Amino acid sequence: KASFKEPLKVFLQAHASEFTELVSFVIGIIGTSIVQSSSTVTSMAVVLASDDIVPMVIAIGIVHGANLGTSVTSSLVAFAAETRPMTGNPLVDLRNLLFAPRQPGFHRAVSTAVVHGMFNAILVTFIILFLEMPFGFIHKGADFMASFFDKSVSQSATVVEALEVITPGAWTKPVTHFL
């Protein structure tokens, strides 16, 4: 993190007008496709945003892209399912990869990957991303939650009291008692 902080800051300042949420969305997709881990890309976006290296809007776009990038990963895994073993002959291997009949497991894997991809494409891209860009509801919600937790921590006498506020049990107990 420390070794890339200054060069990345200089690069982003020089090209700040070119980085939109849509560009950062594509960066998240490509990053997840390369690294094969949306958690890694999301964690890097969180660290970059927390250190003020990238603006929050750009980090949100990267996280959206990382979510859609998981569909690329699942598609790659699905297409590798139930393939014939490689022979070492590139022509035979290419023919087997493209034209040889697949096992039933391949069809199930690809079907599942398509469902995953369509869910992410519809939910993330068309609903959340294109609502976030004009209205910024995720950005505003994140700012609200950060200020709420910041107040909770600053008003608490100890860290344990602050953690009691942000644990899932503190939020789910009222709901479970209501049900």
Image (cartoon, rainbow, N blue to C red):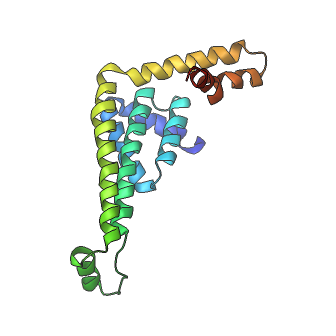
Left of 27 or right of it: where is 174? Answer: right
Q: Nearer the viewer, residue 62 or 54?
A: 62
Marks counted in the figure total 0
Q: In this rendering, is residue 127 above or below 65?
A: above
Residue at x 35% of width, y 49% of height: 116
Residue at x 24% of width, y 77% of height: 101
Q: In which quadrant is the N terminus drawn?
A: top right
Can you name the residue that lies furthest to the right here? 158
Q: Nearer the viewer, residue 168 or 54?
A: 168
Q: Nearer the viewer, residue 143 or 15?
A: 143
> Residue 100, located in which quarter of the rendered image?
bottom left
x and y percent of residue 24 in the render? 36, 37
x and y percent of residue 62 in the render? 41, 38
Q: In this rendering, is residue 72 above or below 91?
A: above
Left of 52 or right of it: where is 112? Answer: left
Can you name the residue that lies furthest to the front here? 179
Q: In this rendering, is residue 154 above or below 93?
A: above
x and y percent of residue 105 in the render? 35, 69
- Is residue 93 something that shows in the picture? yes
- Is residue 19 something that shows in the picture? no
Residue at x 40% of width, y 50% of height: 70
> Residue 149, located in which quarter of the rendered image?
top right
Residue at x 65% of width, y 23% of height: 170
Q: In which quadrant is the C terminus drawn?
A: top right
